[in-house]
Amino acid sequence: MKRSDTSLDPSEHESSAKKSRILTQVSTEHPDLESIHHPPAKAQRKRKRGLYKTIVQQMEFYFGDANLTKSRFMQEALAQDPWLDLEVFLKFNKLVSMLDQSFARIDLEDLWTALSKIQSDLLEIREQTDGKRQIRRKLPLKVKENEDECTIYVENIPPNVSNDCLRKLFTQYDQVSYVSLPKFKNHEGNKGFAFVEFDTPEGVQKALEAFGAEEGVITSEKPPEELQSVKAFIRDEAGDTQESQQELNEKDSKEPKEPNEETQGQTKEKKSKKKNRKRKREEAPEQDDVELKMMSLRIMSKREWKRLRNKYLNQQRENFKWAKKQMNKPTVNTHIKFQEDTGKPRVDENGKPSIESSVTTDIEESQPESQFRLIPGTVVKFTVDTPIEDRTQVKRQVKSAFIDGVEYVDVQIGASEYHVRCHSAELAAKLAAVSCLGQGCVLEGQDEETYWAKMERERAEKRSGKIPKQTIRGRKKVLKKLDVAANSHKYFTDD
């Protein structure tokens, strides 16, 4: 019987069987090998569609009812034109971060593709003839009238918690429409409190019941000043940014150094370490809702928070009313009499310093400074042993020692001398003899003329606006006066 022409040669059959066994063995030992070389296109499309959907959801949040009623930027932009350029949103930090993480770039084309691929019931896009791509909201804005009933106040929030983390935690009680997590201006840390707005008031009730079971609800008897929001407000008012500003000033004052090979190597090493730290922060997972709940978060309804907030503000108003009344009361200022010939203090028949008294009020002190007059012999120059570190302290010492006779104290930080201008030459001679203020002498001749020329030049610059004048008003003005009154020291009294 003849063999068919299509049959394989025995050697070829054996080789084919061997290849089949090898492929079977490889696929068994490395099941992922085939998927590595041939990735499923369907999985890739599904993943990319998920990224597009997340981006569209973020855009819907920007145009959502909750955000539009709170965002001043969006309100002003939409008031000018309901169609906004898509390029505007490439400056939004959250969206930029999402594009960078999803596509490793920040490109308008990716944002346009996402809005084109995913259908949205809220948004509408268009491309004009000039190539501009724009977006607008299709539905009319709905203002929530019961916003306070749908919002809770949350505090004791760790610094590394984000808006998304809080949203994920409270979504189990109701759909979360908005999360407000205030942050400090000079660094990225949050202020320790937030406001979470639900779609309905039922979300507030469910959250209060859940946290109440674990004693996580803030009671209405809590002192208002112990609220985290009030503490952050006090911290801002007290000047929390002073440290950061001082650090910036120190950096600006340092002279730039020429880089050498050693410093360049150190700079590269520091940059690489910074990149590694940044990569670790990005890769570090955010705390989930279970961990957050174990961190003793405290909540209360926004209505109760407003009641405590208003209680604190009313207390502050009463305190300031009392402070203003106290400051407007007449006060007796005393300073010692000096002998005209020797400049030493005068004494009475009991051997005690002779005291002069004058009654002043806060209204009198707040009157504008008298007209600038060039009176010879009225400027006293004081020389000190150590550089001046605090201008305010020097002014307090001078005015406490000689309140009625001082018109102006000219002092600069880091200098070893300062000048004091008095009402009259007689008072200037008396002030120069006060040894606790430094080694004093009345300016005369060329030194006096040089100083007067300097004063005239500085006044002209202030009037022209080259030197901005710092004015303190309202609450800060009262606080400053109270601080001066509390810390002032009378160097010449009968004690």
Image (cartoon, rainbow, N blue to C red):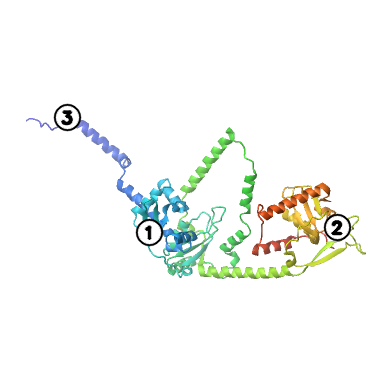
What is the x, y in percent for residue 356? 85, 64
Using a 10 Å C-alpha cutoff, classify the residue at mark 3 as few (fewer than 14 neighbours), some (14 to 19) or many (20 or more).
few
Q: Which residue is mark 2?
A: 426
Where is 334 relative to 36, above or below?
Answer: below
Which is closer to the viewer, label 1 or label 2? Answer: 2
What is the x, y in percent for residue 106? 43, 47
Q: Is residue 460 visible?
A: yes
Name the foreground residue: 39 vs 125: 125
**Distance from Cα at disc 1 to Cα at disc 3:** 69 Å
Residue under the point 10% across and 31% down: 3
**Residue type pointed to by label 3:** Pro
Instruction: Tell whether label 3 touches label 2 (CB within 8 Å).
Output: no
Where is 288 relative to 349, above or below?
Answer: above
- Please tell me the numbered disc located at residue 180: none
Q: Which residue is mark 1?
A: 123
- Please tell me the numbered disc located at residue 10: 3
Sequence-earlier tag: 1 or 2 = 1
**Residue type pointed to by label 2:** Glu
**Residue type pointed to by label 1:** Leu
Using a 10 Å C-alpha cutoff, classify the residue at mark 1 as few (fewer than 14 neighbours), some (14 to 19) or many (20 or more).
some
Q: Residue furthest left?
A: 1
Quadrant of the rendering where the C terminus is positioned: bottom right
Which is closer to the viewer, label 2 or label 3? Answer: 2
Q: Name the secondary structure under disc 3.
A: helix
Name the foreground residue: 374 vs 344: 374
Q: Name the secondary structure under disc 1.
A: strand
Sequence-earlier tag: 2 or 3 = 3
Sequence-earlier tag: 1 or 3 = 3
Q: Name the secondary structure under disc 2.
A: helix
Name the foreground residue: 84 vs 437: 84
